[in-house]
Image: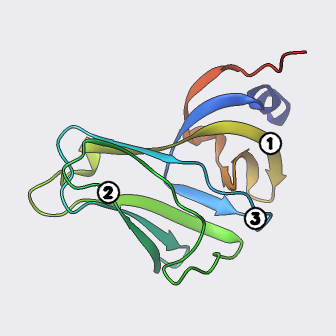
Amino acid sequence: ASAGLATLVGRDCNAVAAGFELDGLGGAPPPLDISSTSPIKQGAVVITNADGKELRRIPIPEGASKATIAWDGKDASGQPVPAGSYKIAVEAGPGGSTSASTITSRWQGRVDSVELTTSGPRLRIGGVLISPSDIRTIGTPTTNPL
C-alpha cells in the first residue's frame, strides 16, 4: 500500500485538517482553507498539542464564510513548536457558525513525500505529516517543463 502512495508525490491535495504531526525538519505548514455555510463570527483556528493544551489561536476574519489561514508553526509566544503530534480545529463564537458540521478546514498543498513512520505511512505536505486517510481531493500531477 505504501508504494501506491508514492503516486501522490507531486500532486496538489486537499486534506482534512485534524490530527497531524510535525517532525522538526522545518518547512512551514501549508495554508488552511476554511469554509462555512454561514458567516463565522468570533472564529479562530486553534492548534493544540497531544495533551490538548492550546498552543496558538489564529483569528478568522470576522463575518467571513471563506478564508485562507496561514500558521507559521509557532506557539503564541513566537517559539517554534517541537516535533510531535498536534490537533487543529476551528471554533466559532456565539451568533456565528456553531455546529462543527457547518465549518470545514482543510490543508491545501503539494505532497512532497511519503514518510514511513512508526505510526504508519504519512504524507508530507509542507511542514506537516498527515494520514493518507485524511486526503479528500487529489489534483493532477505537477510536471516540470524541460
Indicate left or right for 80 with 26 as reference: left
Q: Which mark is nearer the camera, 1 or 2?
A: 2
The residue pinned by badge 1 equals 114
Q: Residues within 10 Å of mark 1 (few under 14, many from 20)?
A: many
- Tell me the element at label 3: loop
What's the distance in space between the residues labelled 1 and 2, CA to CA? 31 Å
Quarter-wise, where is residue 10 in the image? Answer: top right
Distance (Cα) linking label 3 and label 2 = 27 Å
Residue 50 image point, x, y percent? 56, 73
Residue 11, compared with residue 62, is above or below; it is above
Residue 60 badge: 2
Between disc 1 and disc 2, whose residue precedes?
2
Which mark is in front, 3 or 2?
A: 2
State the quadrant of the C terminus.
top right
Instruction: Name the residue at the front extreme.
Output: 146
Residue 23 tag number: 3
Q: Residue furthest bottom?
A: 77
Of callouts 1 and 3, the N-terminal one? 3
